[in-house]
Image (tube, rainbow, N blue to C red):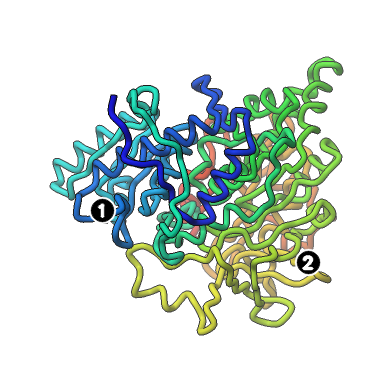
Amino acid sequence: MSTLEHGYLPDDPLFVRLLWIASQCHEPILNDRLRGVQVDFPTLLRDILVFRQKIRDALSPDVIDENGMVARDGVYIGLLATASHEYIVAVFAIAALGAAIAPLPPGISTEETLGYINLCGASVVLVGPESENAAAEIQEHSRINESQPIQTLFLSKWSASQEQLETPTATIQPGLKFDNERPGLLLFTSGSTGAPKAVIHARRYLYSLTRLPPRVGKGEVHLCVAELVSFTSGFHQAFSGLLRGTRIEMYHFATRPELLWNRLKEGDVTTVCLITRMWWDMMVYYQKVICQLPQNQAQEYVQGVRHLRAPQSAAAMPPPLLKRFWKELLGKSLLVTFGTTESGVIFLSSDEESGRPEANVGKPAPYVTIKLTEGDRGELWVKNSTLMLGYMGKEKQDQDIFDEEGFYCTNDVFHRDGDSYVWDGRAKSGWIWFEGHPVLLKSIEDQLLELPYVEQGHVLALWGGTTHQVAALVRFQPEKVPKNESKALNTVRQDLSGKLPETHLPTVLRILHDGEDVRQTWTMKTALDDKEVQRFFPSSSV
């Protein structure tokens, strides 16, 4: 039986908190339902030490210092996996080695994945069980194209028990520190308006996961959607929750709202953060399926979901209809979390602020400094301790995205409402001009979604040759609206005429038929980029 060299962990906020929580929490902290695995803190810590040594052994010796740690900045370890026990361990193991974590977007092509691996220069990629076939394709593609050699290490084969390793006790090594500005995490943007960008975060981003006070012994359960764990909000919620002592439960829901409903029905989940599209799909499922059940069965779902203490919505602003639905069903508002991959969380809303009909995002988080270009309104610039270092591969352009005070421009427009803020839209898209005045397309879309026969709707501006037209891309409830698009357009215009000015009404309509849907990014965000618009409106331009 072999022995690990030592159980020393870095003397930094991330691992100091991890060991403190481990000393206080004696129940399983991870529950991987898909695999039927529950993990307590002693197992988690042992596996972190095992994983770290496996990664160290795979790296070139010239990047390892005399302490067995990564000696220099910019050493990235790829992570190709969805949420699992192994994913959580791998993140801590990479950080404990002093390398940077590079979670690769799931579900993208082999060529794209290999492109991101080459971009960050990762010579080692850790692979989850569900991605082992993709890893083989990456290896073959790399060999054919003679790109840099890549080692793929399979996480499913590692654990302290499987390796029969005699593991030492994990302890903090006083003085073993890394520079706060050393690259620690590479996150990818959603790609809803183009190719995903690789955002470099310093280790201080990882330390920010320890900001919130512990909740050990509070019976907290956070439901982690496996497909979203590499997305900004998903990553932050999962790891900050674990570091508070919240039990993290990982489940593969993908785009199946019935699975979410069945899990929440059990009534023990206290926090969950879903993208707005998932909250919408759950609403539609409730209206179509759960409402048709006998009252006592339907009530079981309602009682279960009402145990949520903090239901959070991220990635897109929820429309008023969606906010009203969940407020009535839950008895509390969806908490709107606004942030960017580049900056992390910017605004945190209260129940009252989230419950307002407009896109109120609440107040800036305590550690965030913001400014608007026109005083109480305008483009939002932000500075905080989780602000990125820059974009991978675009270092020469980074000087243009920060101002002289170190603020980053989000390209989102806000206005102030008392001591909270309201989102007005993206600065360079999402608007249409009428008689010299900009109108937010989302304001038209919100009214479209209020129509009782609309199941899914998107509004965009098309160039008609001399002026822009308001176009609607709509999925109707069956048998509610004429299938002829010209007649359907007349119905929609007539029903919106009392809610919108004549000039704001759609002039073009395209029905989404069965089997058709708008492309979604790897984070399940709607991606209505130019190419996607052309697919539905081939004779027009954006």
The quarter of the rendered structure image containing the N terminus is top left
Q: Which residue reaches farthest bottom?
A: 404
Q: Is residue 527 visible?
A: no
Which image quarter: residue 224? Answer: top right
Q: Which residue is mark 2?
A: 420
Residue 19 picture location, percent across and down: 54, 44
Q: Is residue 532 visible?
A: yes
Q: Residue at x 42, y 50 (%)?
A: 95
Q: Is residue 234 left or right of residue 493?
A: left
Give neighbour class at mark 2: few <14, some 14-19, many 20+ (Cα, 10 Å): some
Give neighbour class at mark 1: few <14, some 14-19, many 20+ (Cα, 10 Å): some
Between 259 and 97, the one nearer to me in the picture: 97
Query: Which of labels 2 and 1 is toward the front?
Result: 1
Report the amino acid beneath label 2: Ser
Q: Which mark, by number, is residue 248?
A: none
Position above or below: 388 against 524: below
Label 2 – label 1 distance at C-alpha: 48 Å
Q: Residue at x 66, y 76 (%)?
A: 378
Position above or below: 164 against 308: above
Position above or below: 170 against 344: above
Per the image, label 1 sits on a secondary structure element best described as loop
- Which of pointers 2 and 1 lies earlier in the amino acid sequence? 1
Q: Which residue is mark 1?
A: 64
Which image quarter: residue 468? Answer: bottom right
Between 482 and 449, the one nearer to me in the picture: 449
Position above or below: 530 against 414: above
Per the image, label 2 sits on a secondary structure element best described as strand
Report the amino acid beneath label 1: Ile
Residue 178 picture location, percent across and down: 41, 61
